[in-house]
Image (spheres, grey):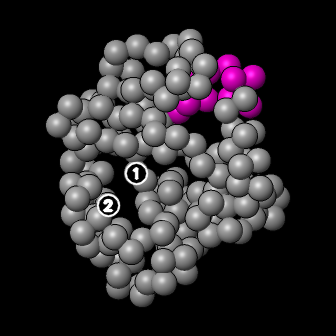
Amino acid sequence: MAREISERFGDARLTIELVPKTSWYSNVRSHVSESQWDRLRKPVYERAQSRCEICGGRGPAHPVECHEVWEYDDEARVQRLAGLIALCPACHGVKHIGRSSIKGKGDDAIEQLMRVNGWTASRAEDYVDLVLDIWKLRSQVPWRLDLSWLAERGVAPPRVAEGMNGPE
């Protein structure tokens, strides 16, 4: 699944990351304390100098937001935390385009996707269709959450269990 995206849209700087429906309503912040979350996200902001790591922009109310990067092993059904990045609110809205659409900002997210990637509306539509197809397939099965990335940084999530849902 991911291979088809990279083959057809390997030029994408900004991508959509739809979390399977079976993994909704949970994220790293729900598995760590507030102080642990601050310890994780603040270096991300510093590393990026409070600029979006994709487009270089900043948001009007707050410069950047911390985004969780997830990788999916479709055969083993494992959703693995791969890291954190700093994103401006506009690029973060693209990553979570489903939530953006619910909030009435779906068109803004598509415009940002097109602008950052230099895509036409047709290319963006083809990309969104493929991402949605993959999301539908992934949403049919439960995912096991792998937060070993946190342990590698000295953060022990208090509520990690086999079969626990993944990120928001």
Q: Which mark is residue 93?
A: none
Q: Residue at x 25, y 50 (%)?
A: 136
Residue 32 painted magenta: yes
Residue behind mark 1: 18
Q: Position of residue 88 (x, y in %)?
A: 68, 60
Residue 52 painted magenta:
no
Residue 111, quarter of picture: bottom right
Residue 48 appears left or right of 7: right
**Kind of residue at disc 2:** Val
What is the crowding at mark 1: few (fewer than 14 residues within 10 Å), some, or many (at least 20)? many
The residue drawn where x is 22% and y is 41% is 74
Q: Which residues are magenta?
A: 27-38
Percent across and percent down for residue 37 are 68, 29
The mark nearer the N terminus, 2 or 1, is 1
Question: SS for tag 2?
Answer: helix
Give the image quarter of residue 115: bottom right
For badge 1, the amino acid type reads Leu
Give the labeled residue for mark 2: 131
Please state, as top left, top right, bottom left or bottom right, where the N terminus lies in the image. Answer: bottom left
